Image: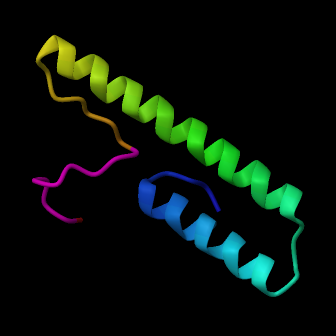
Amino acid sequence: MQTKSLDDLRKILSEEIDKVRDGKTSAANVNAVTNATGKILSSIKLEMEYYKLLGKVPEIDFVKRLDAPST
């Protein structure tokens, strides 16, 4: 599964939680996934803060705009 949106990211994290509960993955694997997730979210936050300083609204494909129509 490609991770193209925050919804995809949430699904992956949820699947990893399910795998831990079912004993189908290791804590190290889940740690790696959550670490990468944190880095992705940090980079999005940094980009949003940068645009805010410029007084602009970022167009980040990974993040759906709340006022954008659903597709």
Relative to 16, does residue 2 appear above or below in the rendering? above
Magenta segment: 62-70
What residue appears at the point 87 percent right and 71 percent down from the top-left corner? 25
Q: Is residue 16 magenta?
A: no
Q: Is residue 67 magenta?
A: yes
Relative to 15, does residue 67 appear above or below in the rendering? above
- Main SS of the magenta part reads loop
Q: Position of residue 64 (x, y in %)?
A: 28, 51
Asked which colour scheme the image uses, the reply is: rainbow
Q: Position of residue 66 (x, y in %)?
A: 16, 54
Quarter of the rendering occupied by the N terminus? bottom right
What residue appears at the point 11 percent right and 17 percent down from the top-left corner? 55
Which residue occupies the foreground of this view, 35 or 6?
35
Relative to 67, does residue 15 appear above or below in the rendering? below
Q: Residue furthest bottom?
A: 22
Q: Position of residue 23 (x, y in %)?
A: 88, 82
Quarter of the rendering occupied by the C terminus? bottom left
Q: As drawn, is 64 to the left or to the right of 40?
A: left
What residue appears at the point 58 percent right and 43 percent down from the top-left corner? 38
Relative to 27, does residue 3 appear above or below in the rendering? above
Counting labels gives 0
| Res 46 → quadrant | top left
| Res 70 → quadrant | bottom left
Q: As drawn, is 19 to the left or to the right of 3?
A: right
What residue appears at the point 54 percent right and 39 percent down from the top-left corner? 40
Q: Position of residue 59 (x, y in %)?
A: 26, 33
